[in-house]
Amino acid sequence: MSSFTLPTRRMLAASLAATALALTVSACGSSASTMPAMPGMDSASAMPSMSATATASAMPTMDGMGAMASGDGLAATNGGYTLTSTTATLPAGKASGYRFTITGPNGKPVTGFAVDQTKTLHFYAIRSDLTGFQHIHPTMAADGTWTAPLAALSAGTWRLFATFTPATGSGKGTDFVLSRTLTVSGMPMDTALPAASASTTVDGYTVTLAGDLMAGMAHPLTVTITKGGKPVTNLQPYLDTYAHLTAFHSGDGAFAHLHPTTAVTGDHGGPTLSFHPELAQAGDWRLFLQFQTAGTLHTAAITVHVS
């Protein structure tokens, strides 16, 4: 590992509400091998590990502001809440609407959700090789059925995550992250996980990460955005923050995301954003940083290694 060691983790904060963003993360794919297609898998035990050294679980964080997420993101059921869907397979290369419900401890669809980062539910899709990232905001029908408009998916095994906070019931105020796997028909063509790096480019922007982070220890992490060698200072709020950072660990399939601690003060964010993550385990992670300028959303992907 280079001297530049970064994590992307999830914030542990149940009793840590007074602590600055603690993020614990695990992951969803592997650079070395691809998860076999297993439709309908609902739990971490159902999803085979893609790294012999991967830790079995980690506590994900749904909200960059400190609430503790219930579960490690790899189960379809946690705390009495279940992500249910009758869809186990979808065709490749075709946009599709993925329908699902969140059922509560009483077995009925939940229809009341608290708003988190301007949305009542966030939905993510990632392929087993950590490609094809999608961050979607589904719509919910009156009966509690959600429809996530997935862009065309490539053949292989995908994991779909839903993050939400019930507004009523036993889980009121608790952040949850649940997931299911999905098989996309066809012959998978895997992509090797890019090597760890301190910077990446997207749409002409250069994203540079700086930090000296180790697993199990909280350290500051900064993200600097430039364009043409000049600092970018026109970041616009996206989901009430200047950047949305999603992490997938190249090992056990878990997920986490966090938001910068930098305060939002209008359409002039940047060039540097501050995070304060704490990764629970070592290994490679694939980060997806989303930020907005001039009404356009950019998604930068970068691999980091945590010792």
Image (cartoon, rainbow, N blue to C red):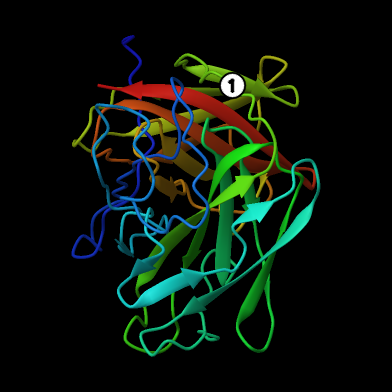
Count residues near mark 1 (Cα–Cα under 10 Å), then give few for <14, some for 14-19, many for 20+: some
Q: Nearer the viewer, residue 85 or 243?
A: 85
Q: Quadrant of the C terminus?
A: top left
Q: x%, y% of residue 1?
A: 31, 11
Which residue sits furthest top? 2
Above-or-below relation of 240 to 141: above
Tell me the residue at 26%/59% (across/down).
Answer: 13
Tell me the residue at 67%/30% (across/down).
Answer: 187
In the rendered image, which quarter is residue 166 located in?
bottom left
Tell me the residue at 51%/71% (across/down).
Answer: 84
Above-or-below relation of 152 to 5: below
Q: Is residue 243 visible?
A: no
205 on left or right of 15? right
Q: Amino acid at mark 1?
A: Thr
Q: Nearer the viewer, residue 53 or 7?
A: 53
Q: Nearer the viewer, residue 253 or 114?
A: 253
Q: Secondary structure at mark 1?
A: loop
Q: x%, y% of residue 148?
A: 68, 63
According to the picture, the residue beneath numbered tag 1 turns out to be 191
Q: Nearer the viewer, residue 145 or 36?
A: 36
Above-or-below relation of 136 to 256: below
Q: x%, y% of residue 263?
A: 49, 52
Tell me the residue at 36%/40% (across/down).
Answer: 48
